[in-house]
Amino acid sequence: MSWYCGACGSEVSSDAKFCGSCGKPRVAQQGATPPLPAAPPFPNPVGPPMPGQQIQYVHVASPGTNGYAIASLVLSLVSACGIGSILAIVFGNMAKKEIAISGEGGSGLAKAGIIIGWIGLGIVVAYFAVVIIAIFASAGSNY
C-alpha cells in the first residue's frame, strides 16, 4: 500500500517523517490513489484558463468627478457681476484639495474653473476701473 502526502499529493515512503517534495511533516494518507491537488485560487494570470477554470470578470467602478470641480467650471463660465468668478476660484481650490486626498476625477475641470475665474474677475475689475475713471473724468468737464 502506498502513502501520499496530504499537502502536495506526492508519494511518501512509509518510513519517512517528512515529504520529499514539499518538506512538510508526514500527515500522509494511506490509500491506492493519491489525493487530487487543490485547484489554484485564481485563474492562470499568464495564459489562457486551464481546463475546468472559470474566468471571473470584475467591474471596477471608476472614481466620480468632484462636484466642486464641476461647480467651479460652471460658475466661471456663467459669472454674474464677479460673484461667480470669485466662487469659481474658491470652489476650484477646494476641489483640487479634495481630489488630491480622495483621488476623484475632475482636476482639469477645477484648474479650468480657477483660470477662467481669474480671467473673469480681471475683466470685472477692469470694467469697474474704466467706469470709475470715466465718472471722474466727466465730473471735471464743462460740457
Image (cartoon, rainbow, N blue to C red):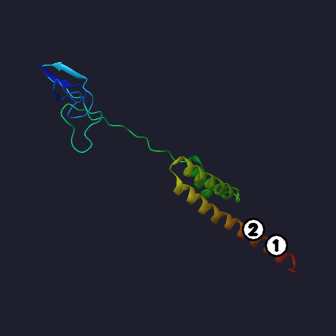
Residue 59 in percent (x, y) is at 38, 38
| Outermost residue to the front | 15
* Count of marks placed on residues: 2
Q: Which-is-in-front pick, marks 2 and 1? A: 2
| Outermost residue to the bottom | 142
Identify the residue position indicated by label 2 in the image: 128
Q: Amino acid at mark 1?
A: Ile
Q: Amino acid at mark 2?
A: Phe
Question: In the rendered view, does 53 fall on the left or right side of 121?
Answer: left
Question: In the rendered view, does 67 fall on the left or right side of 38?
Answer: right
Query: From what the image shows, is residue 114 above or below residue 141?
Result: above
Question: In the rendered view, does 57 fall on the left or right side of 72?
Answer: left
Q: Earlier in the sequence, mark 2 or mark 1?
A: 2
Query: From what the image shows, is residue 43 above or below residue 80?
Result: above
Q: If the image is split into quadrants, where does the N terminus sit? A: top left
Q: Secondary structure at mark 1?
A: helix
Residue 117 in percent (x, y) is at 63, 61
Dot 1, how many residues are within 10 Å of its Cα: few (below 14), some (14-19), or many (20+)?
Answer: few
**Residue nearest the observer in this picture, 117 or 101:** 101
Q: Secondary structure at mark 2?
A: helix
Residue 142 in percent (x, y) is at 88, 81
Question: In the rendered view, does 81 fall on the left or right side of 138?
Answer: left
Q: Are marks 2 and 1 in contact (CB under 8 Å)?
A: no
Query: From what the image shows, is residue 70 above or below residue 128?
Result: above
Rendered residue at 32%/37% (across/down) = 57
Q: If the image is split into quadrants, where does the C terminus sit? A: bottom right
Residue 10 in percent (x, y) is at 18, 30
Rendered residue at 21%/28% (across/down) = 37
Rendered residue at 22%/38% (across/down) = 49
Identify the residue position indicated by label 1 in the image: 135
Alpha-carbon distance for marks 2 and 1?
10 Å
Dot 2, how many residues are within 10 Å of its Cα: few (below 14), some (14-19), or many (20+)?
Answer: few
